[in-house]
Structures are given as C-alpha cells and as structure tokens.
Image: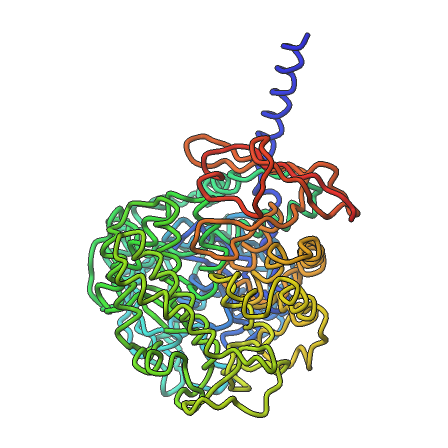
Amino acid sequence: MKLKWMVFCSFLCISWIFSAQKNSKFVNPFIGTDGTGHTFPGPSMPFGMVQPGPDNQDFGWNHTSGYQYKDTFLLGFSQTRLSGTGINEMGDVLLLPINPKRATEKNAYYKETESASVGYYRVTKKDDVNVELTCSNRVAFHQYTFPEKEAQVYLDLQHGLRFVFEQNDPKGLVLESSVKIENNTTISGYCSTANWVNRRYYFTLTFSQPFANSTVLAGKENEKAPKYVLDFNLNDEHVLQVKIAFSTVDVEGAKQNMEAEINHWDFQKVRDENCKNWENYLSRIAIKAPQKQKEIFYTSLYHLLLQPSNIADVDGRYRGVDNEVKTAVNKEYYSTLSIWDIYRGAFPLLQIVVPEKIDGIVQTMLVHHQAKGFLPIWTAWGQDNYCMIGNHAIPMILSAYQNGFTGFDAKEALQAMVETSTKSHINSNWEMFTKFGYYPFDQLDNESVSRTLESGYDDWCVSEMARKLGREDISQDFQKRASYYRNLFDPETSFLRGKNSNGQWRTPFNPLMATSPLNNPGDYTEANAWQYFWTPAQHDVQGMIQLLGGQEQFTKKLNAFFTTESLNPNKFLGQEAMIGQYAHGNEPSHHICYLYAYSNEPKTGQKYIHQVVKDFHNNTADGMIGNDDCGQMSAWYILSTLGFYPVNAADGTFVLGSPQVKKAIINVSNNQRFTIKAKHLSNENIFQQDPTLNKEKLSRNFIRYPELMQGGTLRFHMTRN
C-alpha cells in the first residue's frame, strides 16, 4: 500500500509539473503597456533581435516603446524597439497597410480591436484591414487581410522612436540611407541614425505578392530616407504577407538571416515555432498559484527574457562598438544591456533560469572592453549610449565568476574591471575620485553622491575579483576605495550628503527632495537622500550598521524610511509606487525591503515585501508601476514571489524574504529541481519562520547560488505574526 501511495503521489507531482509546461497561456503582453511600464504587446523571441509591433507615436515619455495601451491612433508597425525603458530608441522600418477606398477617412488610422499572446499580435483597423504579426529571432513576419483585392502599404524608412519629448525636435532622424527597390517584391538597404545611440541597420523586406506601383512621397527638407506608397492587386484571398529581416553588418547578412529562419510563407508555422521556443523558457519555473498570480508571474518571466538581444547574424557576424565587423564566439553578441538596472536582480535571476546564456553575455562585455577600453554602460544595437552612472558590468562579471561560470578568461576580466575603474572615461573621473575620496559637487555637474556610492560598490566587486585571483595588491587598493562612502556620511543628519572640494556640506539640505538630471539636478540620481542612503548596504551591511551606531539604530532608520511621508512624490522621475520613502518604481530602492533581514525586525521587511507584491503589481495593462527597465522590475517580482532577492548582486547569495506562492519548482541545470514550499501560506499568514534547506534548519538569512543550482527543497513555515 505504501508503495502504491508513493507512486500515486509521484504521478500527481509529475502531472502538476507537466501541466505547468503550457505557461505561455498565462502571459499577457499588455501588462505594463498602460502608464509608465513602457512595455509593448508585439511579438519577440527570447533574446531576439526583432520586436515587431504597433507604434502610436514616435516621440515622448509615454511612448518610449512606441506604444501606449489607451492610445488608439496607429502610425504603423515598426520592427525593433526596447522594452520598459525610459528613453526612446529604434522603431525601424515602419509599415502601415491601408484600405485605399478609405484612405482619406481620418478614423482609418485608428485601431478597432486588438489582442496579443506569446509570439502573436493582432489588430483590426477601423478601415477594416486586419493586421497580424509574428517573428523569428531576426525576421519580422506580417500578415495583412484586406476587405478587397485593392490594397496599399505605406513604407516609412524615415521613422524611428526618437529620444525627444517635443514633437518638433529634429533629433532621431535618419542621417544617411541607401535604399534599393530590387524588384516588385523586394526592397533592401541601410539607414544610419543618430538618436540615443548612433547606429546603422541593414534590412531586406519581401512581399508575398508583387506591388503594381510604387510612389515616393515627398518629405520634410531634413529627411534623409524615403517613404513609399505601394499599390497591390491581391489574389482572391485578399491576404498580403511581408517578411523583414535585419543585420548590423550588411544587406547580404539580412538576406541570409531571412533564408535561414523563414524561407517560406507559412505564418502559422512561424507563430507556432515562436510559441514553442517560449515554452522552453517559461516552463523552467512552475508555480502553484491562482490564475491572476500566474498571469503576473509568467508575464514577468516573459518580460525578463526579452533581452538582452543577440544581434549577431546567423553566421555569427556583428558590427561592434568600434564599427568593425567581427565574428562572435558561439554566434552570440548581446546588446540591449540596460546594465544600471539589470545588474541588481535581473542578471542574478538569468543565472538561475538561463545559465547557458551567461558566458555569452560576459564575453560580449569583454569584447566591448577590447574595442573601447572600458566595459559597456548601456548598449543598444551594439553601441553604447553611456546612460546612467557607475560601471556595473563589473558586478555582473564578478557575479558570473563567483557563481562558477568559466566560459571567459578570468584574468582578462579582472584587467577589464581594473582598467574601467582606473582610466577615466565618459562615465568616470577617477583622478577626481581618488584625490578627494568622493565626487565633490562643485567639481561635478550632477549626481555627486550617487556616483560616489555606486563607484564604491563597483570597487568592492573589483576587490573581490582580485582576491579570488590571488591579486591581494589590487584587492587591498579597491577595498579601501569601497569604503569611500563613509566620507559623505554626515553624523548630524545621519545621511550621505553632498560635499564640495573644501569638505563643506551642501546647504540647504532636504533629504526628501528628489533630484533628476532631467528636471531637478542635484546630488542624487532619480532619487533623494533617503533612497540612496542604502546603496552601500549592497556590499557593506555591517559597515552601515556600525555607521549608524548599531542594529537598533539601523532598524530605527529603516522604519523611518518606510514611514516618512513623501514630498510631492509624483513630481520627479523615479518617485513612483511609494511606501514612505521606498520608491518601488525605481531601481535604487529594490534591495531595501530585504535589509530588514539584518535588523531587529525581519518580519517588518516581509510585511513590506508582501505589500509591494500585492499593491504595485497587477495583471492589467496598468499593472506595472514604474518602468520595467529591460526586465529588472519583473525580476524583482519573480524573485520576491519565490522568497528571496540578492541584496548584494555579485556575491552569489540571495537574502530570504517571504514567499508569495505555496509551491514553486525551478528546473535548474543538470535536470535538477529546486523546490520552494510555503506551508500554511494565506492572505493572513504572510510571515515566514523556521526555514529549512533540505530538511536542515537554516541558521542564516540567505541561500547560496550553488545550493539553488544543485537542486533541493527550501521550506518555509508561514504565520500571521
């Protein structure tokens, strides 16, 4: 009887895991598309080069992905974009199918109904044209169904998602182009653009039916790329298909990509292959949860895996940051690296979910260093926009090495980390930093405190990497620099505060006042003194406790942080989804709930984790408060739902919080499973106690990456107080 019961239980477990394999049905691509989430509903492949989708506007804060859920106007459908960013970029090769009999009607350019799922987007325009989109890694695939045989397609190669906030600002226009109509089904060429990054893309597009006529439209005087109206006489099915392939290298590369990935006209086949590919990734975590929670969780996992993008062609060629064409190792060269955001939670999570991608990402960053002389800061289409502060490729590299990844040269990595941290470049002035032991606000235009604190974290990472490689000389030098944050601690106010080159504090000082390079320059980056106070805790929690006078004062400071009312919370960038001074809408706050694990009140942190999950994440279009920032917001939700988060993103540990699901299974490497169980979890029982790992009581407040990846069971006992 006992054996039969064990077999039956095993069958139930396997059945539950198998049923969870179809996790794509829980993905809602519209989550985050309304408001400030800045996601998009169009299809993409995991880590894919193309992201075809609808564009409602080509500029402005609300349309950084080209799309806003409530906006019903349609400019057309471009093929590339960023997910969840605060700045507009890409939006290449805009196509808009038009019913020529209704082309003069104003409402013909508005959407009637739309839907989206993994690998598929569909919209019906008010002129009765139906648009469907899917894609492979490097090729977008459109399918248009017209009401009659007569059809038109508007093709705009001048279009782009422009890094501007006013309509008449000329930035973001194409600087140069060369476009050729090869025949009556194929158009190819390149465009060079200057926007958030300066880049060149090559493309080829081909129609399933020939166009009968092409008309070049006159544009503005400064437009350097053509716009066409293409006329079609369709067959009896009234269906027109378009494939658009891209390359960073040349037109031939784009053509090879199309031939290798979609050498047919079977739209459903491409859609099915796209969805199948996503299932491989989405099935790596199974959770036992209600429908709503599954929709938020798996959409978060979907958003996490949209990037970074592999921009190498199928033959491995790519155009690097030095504009040289090279061949990538294993045909992987990654871009859309929003490093300031993703180093915190997204990259540690990627090491759990997609460990096979990590060596390629690190190798990409080292190749970037070889070409540029310093590690990347924020890359798109292979080029660096130098956005945000710090050099946080450094903690990403340490994190990978710490966690056992060996597909890159560790000595080369250390050299890159040291050179990035000692040779001044566009994002750092190391002579100033080492002279004063901080960035003085009278010698730095902006963000002096934030730059000091974030550089300190990077320095700790360099020190640790050097120590692991036996370079104690380097390690000691950078360990000293890692403590420079103490030079900005003001014991009178108990804040990390701006100081000038004479050692004088900035006055007046208001720790509630958020600063932003866009609208209110000051000493902090998209944040205030409260939020940036906790940055050094990423690498030196005990030092922060000591600085404040002990654990009791540390706890008191945390409690004040979460209860002090905000000053005009919606006025400045990043001050969104607030609990006291905690701003969930921006990354500098993301680790702070978990600092309670080092306080006298760990359950207070668990309370706030539960509140953030419940109040600031939803399965609606406006269900993401704050930019997703290439998956970092999504990563916080996933990790916190599982019950842990990396306070220090580079040391290989995950601090325990409070799980938000009764059961989760992570399919880790080597066919192992890491299971998380939360006994007695309910809406009231939100606090965990007595955690065990593989039936052994945990006497620490964290688990290690190898413990996750070797498989096992983490159990929590949930209570209401």
Residue 599 % position (x, y) = 63, 58
Residue 148 in view here: no
- The answer to whether 225 is drawn above or below residue 235 in the figure is below
- The answer to whether 204 is drawn above or below residue 483 in the figure is above
191 and 434: which is toward the camera? 434
Residue 255 in view here: yes
Residue 513 % position (x, y) = 62, 83
Which residue is at a point 37% across and 73% down the rendered structure image? 386
Which residue is at a point 69% across and 66% down the rendered structure image? 559
Instruction: Tell me where residue 432 sits by quadrant.
Output: bottom left
Which residue is at a point 30% across and 47% down the rendered structure image? 259
717 and 55: which is toward the camera? 717
Q: Is residue 578 left or right of residue 527?
A: right
- The answer to whether 101 is drawn above or below residue 693 in the figure is below
User: By what rule are the colours in the image chosen?
Assistant: rainbow
Label total for image: 0
Residue 600 % position (x, y) = 67, 57
Name the residue at the top extreme: 1
478 and 665: which is toward the camera? 478
Quadrant location of the N terminus?
top right
Q: Is residue 685 left or right of residue 340?
A: right
Residue 416 % position (x, y) = 26, 62
240 and 670: which is toward the camera? 670
Q: Is residue 577 left or right of residue 668?
A: right
